[in-house]
Each structure stands twice: as structure tokens, then as C-alpha cells.
Image (tube, rainbow, N blue to C red):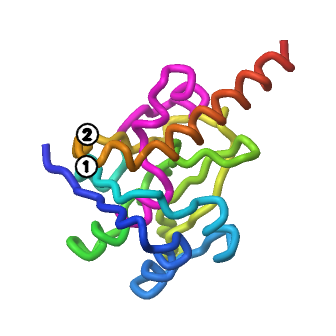
Amino acid sequence: MKTLKIKDDAKTPTSELLAKCKDKFKVWSIWDDTELDKLFPIPKEPTTREFAKVQEAEDFAGKSTQDLVNEGLAKECCTLRERLIMELVYFEKTGNHLDENVITFCAGSPLPGGGVPYVYFTRHDGTVDVSYDGVQKANDDLRFRRAVSLSPSETSGIYALNERVAKLEEQMKKISEATK
């Protein structure tokens, strides 16, 4: 399987990652720079993960982020930062965009209110869209990108991600209990 190696240098703010995308192609984001940097902070340490080198996300079709949290798989999925880096790398290598037919949910970046960010390319206006939806949303057009490898020496850099996923799991448990 061919992979894309995604390195997060733990130096570049998320707003700058989005600005790099905007330098190369049209981008629309629901968040302004301040919100991006607050909601998706720079990791404490650099990380490197590899994802399948496919144009369309393939993993977990028909599942929701909540399903992945329940199954303990959310932390294996890409973060919003990784997805933005992935878009840049893929575009630079191919001249094409990722996710022209599906939407990648970034389950590795749960939002404080229980939502989950997503990214996709809209053909009708040629824009990469960055937004969010609920953790229970699921259909065949919503997919995830699961890491296929992680450098062992860099696993400590994802501890903040694991903490955020744990918080999402707590929130979902409360929602589940409240709806019983």
C-alpha cells in the first residue's frame, strides 16, 4: 500500500497551515484564524503518521464519530491539522485535491461542544471546505482517514490528541445517559 507521510512540526499554528492552503487553492473555513488556533492548537511535540495514499477517504464508511469513539478507534483517525497537511502534500504531488466525492471527518480533533471537523473539495466552485458536524452524523459519503503507521519514537506527541478523545468519550457518555 502506498502511503502519505504526514509530519506535524509542532511549530506551525493551524491558521498558518490553512493560509498555506489558501496560497495554493481556494479555501473556505467556518473558523477564523483565532478560532482555528484555539480549537486546534499546535501539538506539544512533533508527530509523524502515515495514511493510505488515496484520493478519496475509504475508512469506516457509514460510521459516525460516536461509533469510532465507542470502538476506541477515534484516536487512530486524522486530526484536522493532519488533514490540512495531507491536502497540501497531495496537491503538491498530484495537482489534484483529496475528497472530491466524499467528506473526511477528522475524528482525531473532537471539538469541545461534541462536534467533529471535516474537510472536502467542492467541485462546483473549486473550494476546499473546512467545517464541522455532529459526532452522531453517519452516511456513506462521510469517511475517516485512519493512520496506517506511527513512528514509535514519536508516539508521545499524540498524548494531547488522546486527552481530547477521552474528553469526547466523556461527553458522549453524558449525552447517552441523558437520552435514556
Query: Which tag, 2 or 1, sits closer to the chain's start?
Result: 1
Of 121 and 16, nearer the camera is: 16
Quadrant placement of the C terminus: top right
Residue at figure coordinates x 46%, y 42% from the top left? 159
Q: Is residue 84 magenta?
A: yes
The crowding category of the residue bearing disc 2, from other C-alpha atoms within 10 Å (few below 14, some 14 to 19, many at least 20), is some
Image location (x, y in percent) of residue 11: 42, 72
Image location (x, y in percent) of residue 146: 36, 40
Image location (x, y in percent) of residue 121: 47, 65
Q: Is residue 61 magenta?
A: yes
Q: CA distance from mark 2 to mark 1?
A: 6 Å
Residue 142 appears anywhere in the view? no
Of 173 and 25, nearer the camera is: 173
Q: Return the residue at label 2.
A: 148
Magenta stretch, residue numbers: 58-86
Residue 50: mark in rendering:
1
Q: Residue furthest top?
A: 180
The crowding category of the residue bearing disc 1, from other C-alpha atoms within 10 Å (few below 14, some 14 to 19, many at least 20), is many
Q: Secondary structure at mark 2?
A: strand
Residue at figure coordinates x 30%, y 61% from the top left? 7
Image location (x, y in percent) of residue 150: 26, 43
Q: Is residue 31 above or below residue 98?
A: below
Quadrant placement of the N terminus: top left
